[in-house]
Image (cartoon, rainbow, N blue to C red):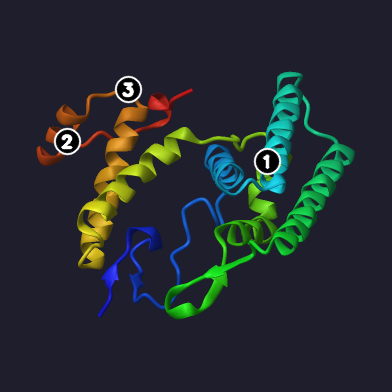
Amino acid sequence: MGHIDPNQNGQRNTGREPVRGSNWGARPASGAHLLRELRGITENFEHQWSGALGNLLIEIKTAADIAKEEGRVLTPENIAAFEEQYLRILEAGKEELEASGFHEMQGKHGRKKQSKAKNLLDRYYKYQKEILAFMKDSSIPFTNNQAERNHRMMKLKQKISGTFRSEKGARNFCRVRGFISMIKKHGRQVFPELMRVFEGAPFIPTVIHRVP
């Protein structure tokens, strides 16, 4: 029987499928994390496509920020041009990896597996919509530092104890961390508010308490 993996929202990880990180999937990706991954590929493997894609993401962010400050959004023409550049860089990356032979690497027992750069390139193809979501919706921040801080405690828990031994334990951990995060967002002290929970009078945010 498998254990509860914090990256799978309480689902069991039997080891049959890789666990996808928090920045890939249904939720918009964090720009800061994406840039770190691209920079790592550029610095460690000296690939050109990853540096070009990182620069493009920064260019899009700058254009989106300017548009937001001016009370407008990026035009369909702007968006189409950026998407074309995005795909062009990925195609160049695919050719670069194939030409360099870095698309595969030696795995365990002599088996060949995809390189980290190729895995990252594939994810940028698959999750283009999520990665570029901030370009089309100004309410989506390019970098969500608060979300990354919230996830960091999950990763710390995973490193220390590996997994949760029950779904109930995983859910309880998430509920406590979520409550603490909410308390901090409202500028309240954590320990006194936790005491109020045990006293039967937990802080419940309303419209009046909404953070601007």
The three-letter code of the residue at mark 1 reads: Gly
**Image side of residue 144 versus residue 121, left or right:** left
Look at the picture and state if 168 lies above or below 183. Answer: below
Q: Quadrant of residue 141?
A: top right
- Answer few, some or many: residues within 10 Å of disc 2's Cα (few below 14, many 20 plus, some between 14 and 19): some
Label at residue 202:
none
Which label number is shown at residue 194? 2
Dot 2 amino acid type = Leu
Residue topped by disc 3: 187
Tell me what residue is drawn at x 77 percent, y 47 percent. Answer: 86
Q: Is residue 50 above or below residue 60?
A: below
Q: Is residue 172 above or below residue 148?
A: below
* Quarter of the picture holding the N terminus: bottom left
Q: Earlier in the sequence, mark 2 or mark 3?
A: 3
For the question of whether residue 51 can be seen, the reply is: yes
Closest to the observer, 198 or 43: 43
Q: Position of residue 208 (x, y in %)?
A: 40, 25
User: Residue at label 1?
Assistant: 51
Q: Secondary structure at mark 2?
A: helix
Q: Residue at x 47, y 56 (%)?
A: 21
What number of labels is visible?
Answer: 3
Side of 58 where 153 appears, left or right: left
Where does residue 101 sit, x and y in percent of width and height?
A: 67, 64
Are there few (<14), some (14-19), or many (20+) residues within 10 Å of tag 1? some
Residue under the point 15% across and 28% down: 192
Please state which of residues 208 and 37 is positioned toward the viewer in this rendering: 37
**Mark 1 or mark 3, earlier in chain:** 1
- Left or right, 15 with respect to 64, comes to left
Q: Residue furthest left?
A: 199
